[in-house]
Image (spheres, helix red, strand yellow):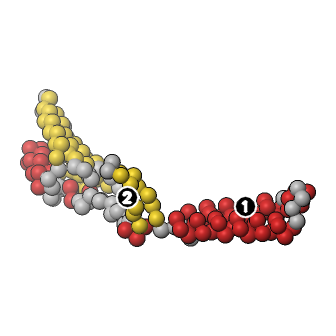
Amino acid sequence: MRKGKKVLATFLLFAVRILIQDLYSFTMLGLSTNSVYLILILAFLVILVLSVLAQNRFRIRSANGTEDISQNNIDNTASETVAPKNTLNDFRYPGSELVSASFNNLILQSSDDVNAVTDWYANKIRDLNLNSVSKILTNSNDNILNTISASSSNQSVYIQITKRSGSNTTKITVER
């Protein structure tokens, strides 16, 4: 049963209950029990007829006037949520070793040159047509920290590529 019908049914039951409880009060006003039952039945029928008439019609006001729209013309299907098509594993650098992984975080290491790794991720982001790209390359005393972040309407990715001075290992952190 739909919410509107539930509300109407609850209202009707509540009204009937109150009228029955106050039956004694109505008889004190000089109305006979049969008159109270007749009023109760008429009120119930009026509410029932009004609910049936209003059940399948909605009124929408537009700038040009008023338009009636039938419930049958309204699309009641849920809209599809657009999920990112790429998984975190799609951002795994080829030949890299997995250090750790979680739902939205991937830590890798590679023996490849830090510039080759950075270029691969820049190309990957371009191939995925992600916009709002930010690329920061930092080198201080041979300690390298490169960051790339990109996003689109339904996904974002942040990549940090580091290599310490004297190390042969490039560390890659990917976050979604």
Relative to 56, does residue 119 appear above or below in the rendering? above
Q: Position of residue 59 (x, y in %)?
A: 44, 58
SS class, disc 1: helix
Residue 139 circle label: none
Amino acid marked by disc 1: Phe
Instruction: Looking at this view, name the residue that lies furthest to the top.
Output: 141
Front residue (pair 16, 97): 16
Relative to 137, does residue 101 appear above or below in the rendering? below
Residue 171 visible in the current orientation:
no
Q: State the count of labels.
A: 2
SS class, disc 2: strand
Residue 58 visible in the current orientation:
yes
Q: Position of residue 105 (x, y in %)?
A: 31, 51
Dot 1: few (<14), some (14–19), or many (≥20) neighbours within 10 Å?
Answer: few
Q: Disc 1 to disc 2, how far (Cα)?
A: 34 Å
**Residue 46 location, quadrant:** bottom right
Query: What residue is rendered at 15% in x and 59% in y?
Result: 95
Query: What residue is rendered at 20% in x and 43% in y?
Result: 149
Closer to the eye: label 1 or 2: 2
Q: Earlier in the sequence, mark 1 or mark 2?
A: 1
Q: Quadrant of the N terminus?
A: bottom right
Dot 2: few (<14), some (14–19), or many (≥20) neighbours within 10 Å?
Answer: few
Front residue (pair 61, 166): 61
Query: What residue is rendered at 53% in x and 68% in y?
Result: 53
Front residue (pair 103, 161): 103
Residue position for label 1: 14
Query: What residue is rendered at 78% in x and 59% in y?
Result: 18
Residue position for label 2: 67
